[in-house]
Amino acid sequence: MEIIVTKNYDEMSQVAADIFRKHLEKQPKTVLGLATGSTPIGMYQKLVEYHKAGLDFSQVTSFNLDEYIGLAGDHPASYRYFMEEQLFGLVNINPENIFIPNGAAEDPEAECRDYEKRLRAAGGIDLQVLGIGTNGHIGFNEPGTPFDTTTHVVELTASTREANARFFDSIDEVPTHAISMGIKSIMKARRIVLLASGENKAEAIAQAVKGPITPGLPASVLQLHPNVQFIIDEAAGRLL
């Protein structure tokens, strides 16, 4: 595990974007694992700038970590909509190579199985970006999620729904369930970059980096990964 501490959010975003840029320049035909939420927005903005300067996404395949159950892809709070607004609609990625769980699927369990099959068919993820929840979740894998889970249906905790309520008109509109890539699926990625910014992430980062490896703090499993980098700003790293 490598820990990179940056001065602030913007520098964190820049360091992360440079990792992805160098990876794409070296390996244009690649499989990326992508995350949503506020943390990676700065990185995506910088990747869009790199694209305008010539960075090519035409051979990229992407898999997103998760999606809310009950939201269609055109819902403004859906993660597909988020990705289109922040990255996909602004670069030359082939829409046929974009994979996000279908939150509107009639059978979410079947969608989970199909998503996992698509992951395997693509050969797995080469470079995965993660955020981290204040409770240590990665993807929507909440505390207590077994480490051997593949893509699955998740019941969101109250703290996660409260944290995401800012993207909705009220907390009552925040879905109670989601589809998430599982911890086992995430750990199969050949390289992982976890981003964290702000004092509210400091405790989770400290436990993930130097605490016991336990399903009670899902991100702690990353201690077992052979190629993982934590890129965090000073506020998020204050307890290290």
Image (cartoon, grey):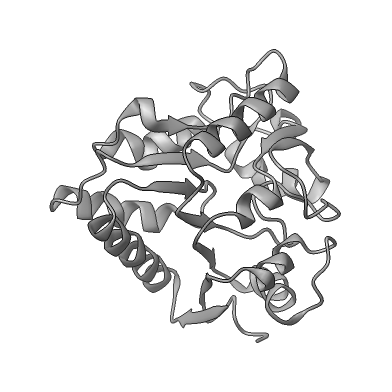
Examine the image and state in which quarter residue 98 appears. Answer: top left
Residue 209: image x %, image y %? 68, 78
Of residues 92 and 12, which is closer to you in this image?
92
Residue 235: image x %, image y %? 57, 78
Q: Is residue 46 above or below residue 37?
A: below
Residue 51: image x %, image y %? 20, 49
Of residues 231 and 86, which is closer to you in this image?
231
Q: Is residue 102 above or below residue 24?
A: above
- Label tally: 0
**The C terminus appears in which quarter of the rendering?**
bottom right
Residue 146: image x %, image y %? 83, 52
Of residues 103 and 22, which is closer to you in this image?
22
**The N terminus appears in which quarter of the rendering?**
bottom right
User: Which residue is drawn at the image coordinates 52% and 32% (left, top)?
Assistant: 100
In the orientation shown, which residue stands out farthest toward the left? 53
Examine the image and state in which quarter residue 215 appears. Answer: bottom right
User: Which residue is drawn at the image coordinates 67% and 73% (left, top)?
Assistant: 223
Of residues 121 and 33, which is closer to you in this image?
121
User: Which residue is drawn at the image coordinates 78% and 79% (left, top)?
Assistant: 211
Q: Is residue 71 above or below residue 155?
A: above
In the orientation shown, which residue stands out farthest toward the top? 106
- Please give left or right for residue 89 compared with residue 235 in the image: left
User: Which residue is drawn at the image coordinates 35% and 59% (left, top)?
Assistant: 20
